[in-house]
Amino acid sequence: MTYLNVDEVETAIALAAGPPNAGFTELITLPNQTWEGRTCHAIRVHHGAAARSGVYLLGGIHAREWGSPDILVNFVQLLTDAYRNGTGITQGGAAVSAEQVRAIVDTLDVVVFPQANPDGRHYSMTVDPMWRKNRRPADAGDPGCPSGGGNGPGVDINRNYDFLWDFPTTFSPSAPVATSADPCSEIYYGPGAFSEPETCNVGWLLDHYPSVGYFIDIHSFGEDILYNWGDDDDQVTDPAMNFSDPAYDGKRGIPDSTPGGDPDKYQEYIPADDRHTLITLGTMMRDAIQAAHGRPYTLKQSVGLYPTSGTSDDYAYSRSFLDSSKDTVLGYTIEWGPQRSSIPKSFHPDYPDMVPIIEEVTAGLLAFCLAAARRTLDAALADAHTNG
Ligand SMILES: [Zn+2]
């Protein structure tokens, strides 16, 4: 066994949405072709009346993080097989029952987009293993970037979303924000927010599946589960101090933990209930990951890794703050191992080392979906009581 190549990921998703599973799956064709002309697909898993909530799982944004599409293909195959056959799912020491599989598929829209940057993945797997970005070509007249070792033109898709994207304006000049305006940098934010077809495809799914209430972007590596926000420390007391107010431009991105403290005192507002839910569901995901193969991932706020701008999880969560007609989408980023475990550190470990990682993250995602389904069912029950 080895990592799936670009075509194999597409084939696996098409098969999972094939005839035996047609009653509870939908193959989704994303509207924007990549720079190299590839068409991307996602799959929605749900059975029955319109879902009241949904979980959106994204993978393959960073090209060199080879395991993320493999994790999501494994997740989709196990979930669809188990639902069709009426069985449970076991991953190492973690398990969900047949009844729990039914609860997930009958309650939620589970939208899975496993390979959002196929051009980058192909390039990483065939030319430059450290490639991270998409394959946007250098602009005409651009003198060009040195290439190799992950260097070259292209955009870091996970700095290209419309959330505080314009970091030279929105962040403090002294913020250690991990993004760059240099087209040769591997964290180049692009010529504009949503300038890239891959970024637009991720956003398109949020627009077209409004049932989605939870979003998880799969990355490596770190053995971490990160939750909103990523730009600065969370605060629950001052709704007016938030990303949408330009009065705070130039002040964001210096966490209180910075040596010398935070001279600008900016913190990002998060409603206490959202923060509580993020931590509660994130803890269930962490515990299931640990149950699979004993590895303790760390649950923490995204900014605890480093301050970021233009990322997917914060964009997904920010949408309902700007447009009250949209429902809340709580955002996570998983950074799968190896970090603290004994596996050699790599964005793409030797495949035998990747297998338990695939299993543990799949276990975490299943536990997360189950918790989200239960929360949805509880809310429906509470509504029925109120209305009855
Ligand atoms: Zn990544």
Image (spheres, rainbow, N blue to C red):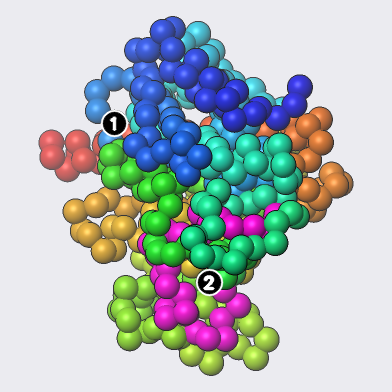
The residue beneath circle 1 is 51
Q: Which secondary structure dominates the residues rendered in magenta?
A: loop
Q: Is residue 297 left or right of residue 53?
A: right
Please, what secondary structure does the residue beneath circle 2 have? loop
What's the amino acid at mark 2? Ala
What's the amino acid at mark 1? Ala
Q: Nearer the viewer, mark 2 or mark 1?
A: 2
Residue appearing at x 60%, y 77% in the figure: 176
Q: Earlier in the sequence, mark 2 or mark 1?
A: 1
How many neighbours does mark 2 have within 10 angstroms: few (below 14), some (14-19), or many (20 or more)? some
- Whether residue 274 is visible here, answered yes or no, is no
Please, what secondary structure does the residue beneath circle 1 have? loop
Residue appearing at x 37%, y 28% in the figure: 28
Q: If the image is split into quadrants, where does the N terminus sit?
A: top right
The residue beneath circle 2 is 181
Q: Residue furthest left?
A: 388
Which labelled disc corresponds to residue 297? Answer: none
How many neighbours does mark 1 have within 10 angstroms: few (below 14), some (14-19), or many (20 or more)? some
Q: Which of the two residues, 388 or 138, is positioned nearer the viewer here? A: 138
Residue 107: % across, % down:
35, 28
User: Which residues are the magenta region?
Assistant: 150-177
Residue 237: % across, % down:
37, 77
Q: If the image is split into quadrants, where does the C terminus sit?
A: top left
Residue 344's place in the image compared with 232, above or below, is above
